[in-house]
Image (cartoon, rainbow, N blue to C red):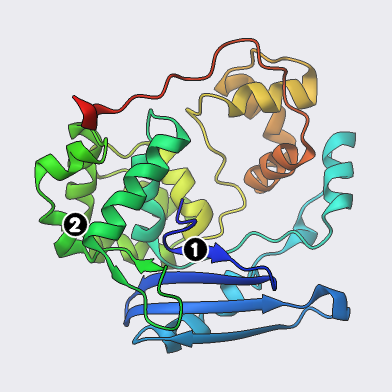
Amino acid sequence: MCKGTCFRTTPDGSVWRASRTPAGPGTLRVALHPAAGTDEAEAEAWGPGAEWLLEHLPALLGEADDPAAFTPRHRLVAASQHRRPGLRLTRTSLVLEALIPSILEQKVTTDEAYRAWRLLVRKYGEPAPGPDARLHVMPDPRTWALIPSWEWHRAGVDNKRASTILRAVRVARRLEEAAAMEPQQAQERLELIPGIGPWTSAETVQRSNGAPDAVTVGDLHLPGIVGYALAGDRNADDAAMLELLAPYAGQRHRAARLILLSGRTPPRRTPKMPRGDIGAL
C-alpha cells in the first residue's frame, strides 16, 4: 500500500521505508546481500524514530518468525516453499500503519485504495526525514482526525471507510498496544471498533504482528484461489477454504501466502471489479 509514498526499492537492491514510530517520524534504508552467502543486512535510519526503527529491524526482517514450525501438507505448497526457502513473515510492530491502508482497501479495487492512500498521505503527512525527498510519513492520529469530509471525498473514500478510520485514530494509543498482544487478542481489540471486521483485522495483524495463523476471511478472491490450488474448486467459499487450510492450523496465513506465491490461480472468467471514483461526483 505504501509503495512510492512511504516505501520504495532502488536499483541497488535497497528498501526504503518511512514510518511514524512511537518516537516520531523515521526513515529506514535496508540493503540485503544474499549474493554474499550470508543473512546479513546493512541498515541506516534518520529522524526522531531512527533508533526505534533500528531496534525493531530484526523483527521487521522476520527474526521472530519460525518457518520450521510449518509442515507442507500438499505437493503444491511444498513446491512453493522449496522455491522460497528464505521466506519469513515480517513484523512491523506498528498497528495504524497497517490498519488504515487495510480500511481503505475495504470493498474497492486495489488501485482505488492505493490512490486514496497516496493522495491523503502526501497532502496531510510530512516529508520523511533523510535524503529521499520522495518519501512521506503518514499523518499522526490528530491530523487524520482533522481531515475535512470533502478531502476524503476527493480521495475517493466513502463515508463508511472514512468514519471507520476516524473512530480508529481516536483510540490510536489503545490500538497500538495490540502490536504486543497475541494475534487473536490483537484482532479482538481491533474488531471492537465499528467498521473493523475479521478481514480488516487479519490483514492488519499479518503485517503488524507477523501472525502466521491470521488467515483472511471475507476476501473476494482468496477462497477461490485456495480452493482451486488445493482441490480444483474455483468456487470455494470461506468455509471450504478454512476446511482446506485446517491441516495448517497455527500456520494458515503462511500456507495461504505460499499458495499465492505458487502462481496457481483460476483463469479469469468474469470482468474485473469496476473501478469507481466518488471524488468525481
The mark that comes first in sequence, 2 or 1, is 1
Q: Are marks 2 and 1 in contact (CB under 8 Å)?
A: no
**Helix, strand or loop for disc 2:** helix
Mark number displayed over residue 260:
none
Residue beneath label 1, please? Answer: 7
Residue found 39% across the figure and 29% down from its top: 108
User: Could you tell whether 108 is left or right of 75 in the image?
Assistant: left
Quadrant for residue 178, please give it.
bottom left
Residue beneath label 2, please? Answer: 144
Q: In this orientation, which residue lies closer to the viewer: 70 or 38?
A: 38
Residue found 47% across the figure and 27% down from its top: 218
Q: Is residue 210 above or below residue 15?
A: above
Q: Is residue 262 above or below residue 224?
A: below
Foreground disc of the pair 2, 1: 1
Q: Amino acid at mark 1?
A: Phe
Residue found 34% across the figure and 49% down from its top: 117
* Numbered circles on residues, count: 2
Q: Amino acid at mark 2?
A: Trp
Residue 153, x across and y down, in percent = 18, 36
**Helix, strand or loop for disc 1:** strand
Quadrant for residue 107, please give it.
top left
Residue 143, x across and y down, in percent = 16, 62
Measured in 3D between alpha carbons, the distance from the residue under mark 2 to the one under mark 1, in whole angstroms, is: 20 Å
User: Label 1: few (<14), some or many (≥20) within 10 Å?
Assistant: many
- Would residue 100 be visible to someone looking at this image? no
User: Could you tell whether 10 is left or right of 173 in the image?
Assistant: right
